[in-house]
Amino acid sequence: MKAIVYGGPGKKSWTDVPDPSIINPSDAIVKVDTTTICGTDLHILKGDVPAVQEGRILGHEGVGTITEVGASVTTLKPGDRVIISCIKSCGHCANCRTGLYSHCLGDEGASGIGWVFGHLIDGTQAEYVRVPYAENSLHLLPEGVTDEQAVMLSDILPTGFEIGVQYGRVKPGDTVAVVGAGPVGLAAIATAGLYGAATIIAIDLDRNRLEQSRAFGATHVVLSGDSDWKDQVLSRTDGQGVDVAIEAVGIPATFGMCTEIVRPGGTVANVGVHGKPVELHLENLWIQNINISMGLVNANTTPMLLKLVAQKKLPAEKFATHHFRFEQFIDAYDTFARAAETNALKVVIT
Ligand code: NAD
Ligand code: ZN
């Protein structure tokens, strides 16, 4: 089969690799019908994620059709159409039982740290993928939900919701600021309303991203390059600061911005992946009773978010801005990597 294979920093190829096969009885093989590219794939290609080894098939988002299941899989069968979670999880270990799927202790690997597809196991940017613990790592696709909606439920919608909105403890009536209106920040914006946020402020350097954010539910937008960006945010909160500031970029400057605009007693929910240490002025945070939360997505809310997408209560289809065929995969990467010029949010590959 063909797949996108990581060849070390800066190197990837769309190349022939052996088809995957069932290894463990809880596995399924899925023919990938639709996949996409994540900012994290670009981080890997830069060489920022040392755990990813040369030869790894990239990608952790996908929708497909089951072609084969292992002997212990009873709730899924060949022909079923499924969403592939970004993370494999057994569903019954001590961590999975508390919803901490990103730290599954399942016996395959048993590392307990984030078995994300395309990192430590082969991923979804391929014609076929082996999915361990298929019954927990796959979700049946209901009628009426399109592939391009469903593929946003592998990673970006659960990430924005779980790590931004849930960890941020958004409550009815809250004012929420989201710093970084890329796909993950937009997912936080789109899901903040589920807990009744009254005011949602999108903050980004890029005017196009800010314009796009209104379609996802941003009530106000602020250009972070404006010298008075902070006053613009505070003016929406009677000068008090926002209840929840969600960091969705992954650089120290934007984490710092969140700490500047959060109200005393509020929460900074860090979603961004920081490749480098971030300085924390603990005394400033302490004196203001600021909560800080962060973490790797668990994707345990995918089934719930799927229901909302099916009921047209979440605009998952709005993320898909560009479409490619599998054989155009390298062009898809190029378009996604030049998002500032191409206005790409998510490129969908079928
Ligand atoms: P992206 O690069 O597509 O979007 C980032 C956005 O931030 C862009 O719109 C960019 O214009 C904006 N930005 C950059 N610098 C800024 C600044 N100084 N001020 C304001 N805005 C600025 O990224 P994405 O795919 O949306 O992902 C966002 C982050 O979430 C990344 O760090 C990604 O690795 C991380 N992520 C985390 C998890 C998790 O499990 N916690 C899962 C997936 C992705
Ligand atoms: Zn587990």
Image (cartoon, rainbow, N blue to C red):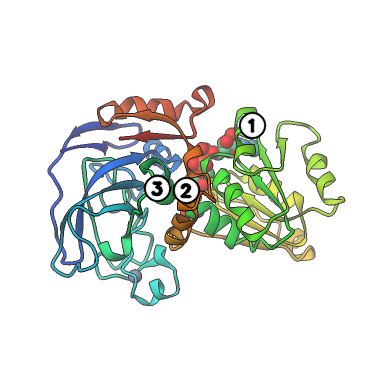
Q: Count of labels shown?
A: 3
Q: Residue at x 72, y 37 (%)?
A: 222
Q: Secondary structure at mark 1?
A: helix
Pointer 3 local density, CA inside 10 Å: few below 14, some 14–19, many at least 20:
some
Asked if disc 3 and disc 1 are in contact, CB closer than 8 Å, the reply is no
Mark 2 within 8 Å of ligand 1, using the beta carbon? yes
Q: Quadrant of residue 136?
A: bottom left
Quadrant of the rendering where the C terminus is positioned: top left
For marks 2 and 1 on the same chain, the one whose residue lies earlier in the sequence: 2
Examine the rendering and report whether any part of residue 159 can be seen. yes
For marks 3 and 1 on the same chain, the one whose residue lies earlier in the sequence: 3
Of circles 2 and 3, the one toward us is 3
Residue 214 lies, in percent from the top left, at 64, 38
Q: Residue 35: which numbered mark, if any?
A: none
Residue identified by numbered label 2: 156
Q: Residue 211: which numbered mark, if any?
A: 1
Q: Residue at x 55, y 52 (%)?
A: 271
Residue identified by numbered label 3: 145
Depth check, front residue: 71 or 123: 71
- What's the residue type where badge 1 is placed? Glu
Tell me: residue 210, above or below residue 21.
Answer: above
